[in-house]
Amino acid sequence: MSKKGRTASSKKRRLEREQKYRREAIITTAEKFFLDQGYDATYVDQIAVTAGYTKATIYNYFESKDDLFAAVISRAYEKMVQLFEEALTQPGVKPELRVLGDAYVSFVYKFPDYAGLVDSGRVGLTIGNIIQKENNQPLTQSEQEFRHNQLKIQALLEKAISETMKTSKVQTSVDSFSVLMVLSTLGLAIRELALRGKRNGWPEERSREYLDVLLNIIDKGLKHYMD
């Protein structure tokens, strides 16, 4: 490569680093507002002023406030995926609901602000909008990252549900798809239990004990249903 080519390549890499740094700085600022004020009370103008950029610069990196929110939630989902995968890679661990439930309790207690944001109704709307959009137009970087992490969590949950059904031998006796659909709602119950524990100031271990009670009831119910 010529000296001119090396110089151009070096400038390109430097520009990419600067753009990445600027984008991450904007997300970090937006995250503080979303966590402190919620989605509705947060404005792009506030984010721009606090981050030290113009509003036009913000829109150079993000399509809208929704796009910024997707970037922030993607960070939360990354943490959740990391905890789920760490829990599932422990020696002798099966990918069952109990393992993911325990990992979600860890997520709530380690990252309570993220957990509260994930629990907001806005996340479901964001998922719906992205699914609708991806059918007929390209997603933004934030939306792609969010969707990637959301699908990872979905896949882990589906695998855990299938393994739980297999352990309870439900698959051999009833319509497994029906059970799968019913059990898929347990993610909401586990999430509510963990969040309630954090809000009420329970020790993390107590939340795990309550989760264990819930999953024991589910396990016994599945075996009873099988009979």
Image (tube, grey):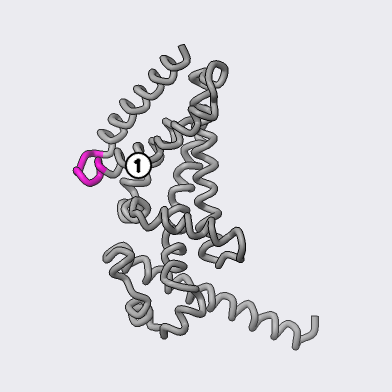
Residue 222 on the magenta span: no
Q: Nearer the viewer, residue 9 or 168?
A: 168
Q: Quadrant of residue 101?
A: top left
Q: Residue furthest right?
A: 1
Q: Residue at x 46, y 84 (%)?
A: 56
- Percent coordinates x, y for residue 165 in the rendering: 50, 24
Residue that label 1 marks: 191
Q: Looking at the picture, tell me which residue is in the foreground, 132 or 104.
A: 132
The verdict on residue 202 being magenta is yes
| Horizontal relation, residue 134 to residue 124: left or right | right
Q: Is residue 7 above or below residue 146?
A: below
- In magenta, the rendered stretch is 196-203
Q: Is residue 31 left or right of residue 173?
A: left
| Amino acid type at mark 1 | Arg
Percent from the top left, x then y, of residue 139?
57, 64
Number of marks in picture = 1
